[in-house]
Image (cartoon, rainbow, N blue to C red):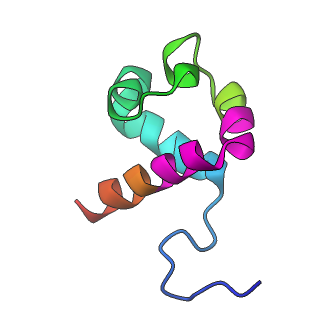
């Protein structure tokens, strides 16, 4: 598995992505931007990571939001 050097997520953990998004938007802001229950109902980094690691479509949305938030 070869990572592209132009991949903006290369070397960044899912935990770091989620922590940065929570710091920037808060849980309420994340829940508004991405409609996922783990961001709405008693959210935590640990429970959200567990869900995102098992749910590829949700992880893709979180990673896309992170990339957009880094460009701005």
Quick check: 1 above or below 8? below
Indicate the quadrant containing the N terminus: top left, top right, bottom left or bottom right. Answer: bottom right
Residue at point 44% right, 42% down? Answer: 21
Quick check: 22 above or below 1? above
Q: Residue furthest front?
A: 57
* Percent of width and height locating residue 63: 49, 54
Indicate the quadrant containing the C terminus: top left, top right, bottom left or bottom right. Answer: bottom left
Is the stretch drawn in magenta largely helix, strand or loop? helix
* Percent of width and height locating residue 33: 33, 34
Is residue 10 found left or right of 25 in the rendered image?
right
Q: Residue furthest top?
A: 42
* Percent of width and height locating residue 57: 57, 47
Q: Residue furthest left?
A: 72
Residues shaded magenta:
49-63
Residue 45, magenta (yes or no)? no
Residue 50, magenta (yes or no)? yes
Residue at point 60% right, 63% down? Answer: 12
Is residue 11 found left or right of 17 in the rendered image?
right
Residue at point 59% right, 74% down? Answer: 10
Residue at point 40% right, 31% down? Answer: 30
* Percent of width and height locating residue 70: 34, 60
Is residue 70 found left or right of 40 in the rendered image?
left
Quick check: 1 above or below 36? below
Quick check: 1 above or below 47? below
């Amino acid at each position: 598995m070869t990572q592209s050097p132009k991949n903006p997520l290369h070397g960044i953990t899912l935990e770091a992505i989620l922590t940065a998004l929570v710091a920037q938007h808060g849980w309420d802001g994340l829940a508004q931007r991405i409609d996922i229950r783990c961001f709405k109902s008693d959210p935590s980094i640990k429970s959200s990571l567990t869900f995102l690691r098992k749910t590829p479509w949700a992880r893709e949305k979180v990673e896309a939001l992170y990339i957009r938030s880094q460009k701005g």
